[in-house]
Amino acid sequence: MALIGPGGRPITSVKPSSAPAGAAGAYIKDSSLETFSADVLEASREVPVIVDFWAPWCGPCKQLTPLLEKLVTEAKGAVRLVKVNVDENQEIARQLRIQSIPTVYAFRDGQPVDGFMGAVPESQLRGFIAQLTGGASAAAGVEDLLAAAQEAVEAGDLASAAQAYGAVLQEDPGSPKAVAGLARCYLTSGDVERARATLGLVRPDGAQDEAIRAIDAELKLREAARSAGAAAEPLRARLAADPNDHQARYDLALALDAAGDRQGAVEELLELTRRDRKWNDEAGRKQLLTLFEAMGAADPRTLEGRRSLSSILFS
């Protein structure tokens, strides 16, 4: 692919383009019609080159360009970024048929291979770069995507989190952390069936990963609570009348957990185990272990609950 310069001549000779000083200068630069061939077409024969078409008046560009610069810098040479101000380089925009900005093209071996228009979330940009660089920065890209996904979860942005986990699975099929994360997104949104189906994507050697076990336990708790279907207050009334109504106490633990009171559920199950550890084939102890699995080994509630359970079992 050749760009045509003034007078209709293909550009073959180039002038050095300006680039920021420092380490990032090797990966990020501004380009023009005179330097585009060297900055993009020739450079993309060595590593993929992302071209960011922007303008000073473009609001979304002010969001997208800094993210691109950040992620390209993090890639440490696995990909480069070339920025083209369309106001100053209308001929490039015309030849590449840029119709709106921001527009991003990715070049490899002198040819455009991918692209998108508009500002997109950081998680999607990480996926875009991870796909473009392939194995060159796969491990770092996967870790960055997982970190971005976790940030999105913490911010309550389940859509972006799911997108990032999906990008990880494209790079690392069956990844336990990505499968568990995506399943948790579905579970948090209330889609228990898709969460359960997603767990089936984990590769065989990851089935016992802590993250997979935790989400599997969480699903079992949801399913148990749904099958119990009892309200807490009538169960409390039954226990007030008969503290040894073990079924009522067990069902109360399920109801409390379904309502978000996991600590209350743990306490009721501990009390059930203390009163009759062998009731219903040790149902209290087994449900406690499921709760501990769902919360994770490092959760303070798990640590305290395990100590209390050991005290009951070995007293």
Image: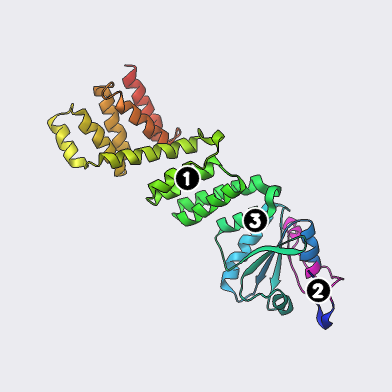
Q: Which residue is mark 2?
A: 34
Q: Which quadrant would residue 3 be assigned to in this image? A: bottom right
Q: Which residues are magenta?
A: 10-37
Q: Secondary structure at mark 3?
A: helix
Which mark sits nearer the N-terminus, 2 or 1? 2
Question: Is 22 a magenta residue?
Answer: yes
Left or right of residue 133, residue 190 in this image: left
Residue contact at pointers 2 and 1, CB within 8 angstroms: no
Residue nearer the viewer, 155 or 186: 186
Q: Which residue is mark 3?
A: 129
Disc 3 to disc 2, C-alpha distance: 26 Å
Quarter placement of the N terminus: bottom right
Of all residues, the one furthest to the top in this rendering is 315
Q: Amino acid at mark 3?
A: Ile
Q: Which residue is mark 1?
A: 198
Q: Residue at x 46, y 50 (%)?
A: 154
Which mark sits nearer the N-terminus, 1 or 3? 3
Q: Amino acid at mark 1?
A: Thr
Q: Secondary structure at mark 2?
A: loop
Q: Is residue 175 above or below residue 102?
A: above
Give the percent coordinates (x, y) of residue 308: 34, 25
